[in-house]
Amino acid sequence: MFAGAFMMGAKDRLLPPSVPYRFFATAVVLHFAGWAALLAGAEDVPGFQGGLGPALAGLHLMTLGVLAMTAIGAAFQLLPVATRRQLGPVWACRLTWWLYAPGVAVLGLGMATAAPWALHAGAALTVAGLALFGVLVARNLLQVTDLPSVTLHVWLALASLAALAGLGVALVVDIDAGFLGHRASAAAAHAVLGGYGFMGMLAMGFSYVLVPMFVLAQPVPDRVGRTTAAVSLLALGLGAGGALAGQGVVAALGGLAGLVAVGLHVKGLMEVLKTRMRRKLEPFFRLVKAAWALLPASVLAGVALALGAPSELVAPLWGFLLVFGWLLSFVTGVLQRIMPFLASMHSGADGRKPALLSQLTASRPLAIHAACHGAAVVLITAGLMAPSPLAVAAGAGLGLAGATAFAAFAVELMRRYRNHQRTHPPQDNGELARC
Amino acid sequence: MVEAAVGAASENPGPPGWLAMALDVEPFDVRPLLARAEDPLAAILTRAGSVDFGGFLVVDAPFNPTPLRRVLAAQGFSSYGRRLSSSHWRIFFHMDGGRDWERDAEVESGPEGALTWREEDGLHIDVRKLTPPLPMLAILRAIEAMAMPEPLVVHHERVPRFLFPELAERGWKVARVTEEFADVRLWLEPEA
């Protein structure tokens, strides 16, 4: 237990709802934009191995705009509660959004249109936002001596973020300057660090808090978290290092170590599910389980690529399974649970009767999203293997429809939240009403 | 599960406010010494001697060490004892001049490590020092285990915001909250 844990009251840790929700709302909008960009660039997606255009824009709108955007909002809200330490001033959290959200939008525009000013300005703002996020999270983690299952993975995510941001800037500058000796190797290392390092380690670390909290179960034992972090470190080192050096066998060994980490991670969470108090898993869990299946599939595709499988076929498949398969399934699953949960929590923060989670959640749009998302993943995977631009376009269209349904869920959530606040006046119940 | 309060504590049932800070102190477990037939008194008194005013000492023993508590009360220590099991007591000492000199509670330890006991105002549960999400789990388990709903008094180190949506789903509400330094108490009860 860390010293001085009592120095901070719960009210200090509760951010204004506008802070996490501005990130979540942006993620919902860019989710739509990402699928739209992929649809626009569907012709180029089969055989895609890099290069400016709508396909690259769609990929980054998803990674930076949806995955990382959600992760930042969730981290700002959840990390201080999980670690019981302050994260940073609210203005710094807001500033992160003001740097990062326009940065991602402009970077996406630059990638889609090949406009150098947008590429450079977007990359600079995006990196600045991510750097501020990294500093805030690092300050929080430096005060924590327990919760190794969470903190070790978040540290790995931050280390990966620093490396991938450096590589990302180098890749953007290289478009004009052309100084990278082997651009494809740098891009592959950038993908490993971004997908499995930054986003993957955040997903694994936060899963160790979120999954037990959502299913009401005992957390994963610390030894499991320490082990998955150690094996992940090895996997990331070998995977990214091997990719950067152009050593396919080394990168493949990293992939195999990654499979071990994934196996331990999923096994640990399955054990959590066995002890849960909430007998029936909520609908969002279908996406989480799909993500658990797609994660090792993406690693296997990466290993095959590293061992010399045809890159025009396997490279886009690997990237798609990693970003749209594993990470997007996981993040949209978690986001649809976190958004109404936080809305319910904030609805009772000033002494009001809290809005019921079940009443805030519109289940029909979420069912439509899940069906469209699943069909999109299957169709595009088939379209990449065939290869068939038509199947990719059809899949992207379904993904766009799913993103529209997800946006409808988010709008309806806000409408129900505001309606609840309007019809339930605050009540005085001691300190609670003043927190 | 019976709360037995003596001395100054009888006017103020429940654990003392200073307990929240004492929970941070690593217990001195004298059970191995006693198992080897060694008298731990000297070691305890040595440690007690190094406690400054306002400080704490925590002792784990196989029984309620009443003589020791009286000895330390004479030196200015208040104490609060918890019977964790039939052969395990944890005594929290606080050097405060002996204002709140001796209290005991028989408690039950749940699977999450939360301690529960009964007082006149209902069932009490202490979830301090548990890492998230264990406090929420322990509180919801206590609520769901009730055959007849009754008030539940939660001893926490913070206002557990993430608990509120789960309470609302179960038809429970937070009736009252008091928040003092290192000691947050919530009175939970079913919605009328």
Image (tube, coloured by chain):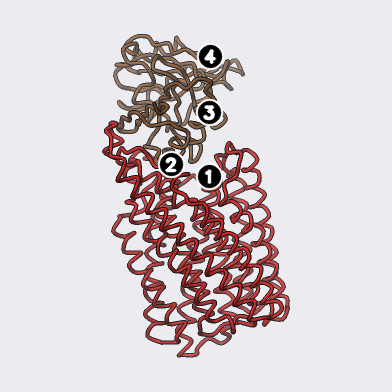
Chain colours: A red, B brown
Pointer 4: residues within 10 angstroms few (<14), some, or many (20+)?
A: some
Instruction: Examine the rendered structure and indicate whether residue A401 appears above or below residue A281.
Output: below
A75 relative to A227 in the view: left or right: left
The amino acid type of the residue labelled 2 equals Leu
Q: Nearer the viewer, residue B122 or B61?
A: B122
Most distant residue in the bottom direction: A177
- x%, y% of residue A314? 68, 76
Q: Decide which of tag 1 and tag 2 comes sooner along the chain.
A: 1
Residue at 48% over, 33% down: B170
Q: How much space separates mark 1 and mark 2, taking CA atoms? A: 15 Å
The amino acid type of the residue labelled 1 equals Phe
- Residue that mark 2 sits on: A356
Whether discs 4 and 2 lie on one chain: the answer is no
Q: What is the quadrant of the C terminus of chain B in the image?
A: top left
- Residue that mark 4 sits on: B63
- Label ID, residue A270: none
Q: How much space separates mark 4 and mark 1, taking CA atoms? A: 40 Å
Q: Decide which of tag 3 and tag 4 comes sooner along the chain.
A: 4
- x%, y% of residue B119? 42, 16
- Residue that mark 1 sits on: A214
Pointer 3: residues within 10 angstroms few (<14), some, or many (20+)?
A: few
Instruction: Examine the rendered structure and indicate whether residue A171 appears above or below residue B76.
Output: below
Q: Nearer the viewer, mark 4 or mark 2?
A: 2
The amino acid type of the residue labelled 4 equals Phe
In which quadrant of the rendered view does residue A354 lie?
Answer: top left
- Residue that mark 3 sits on: B144
B159 relative to A392 in the view: left or right: left
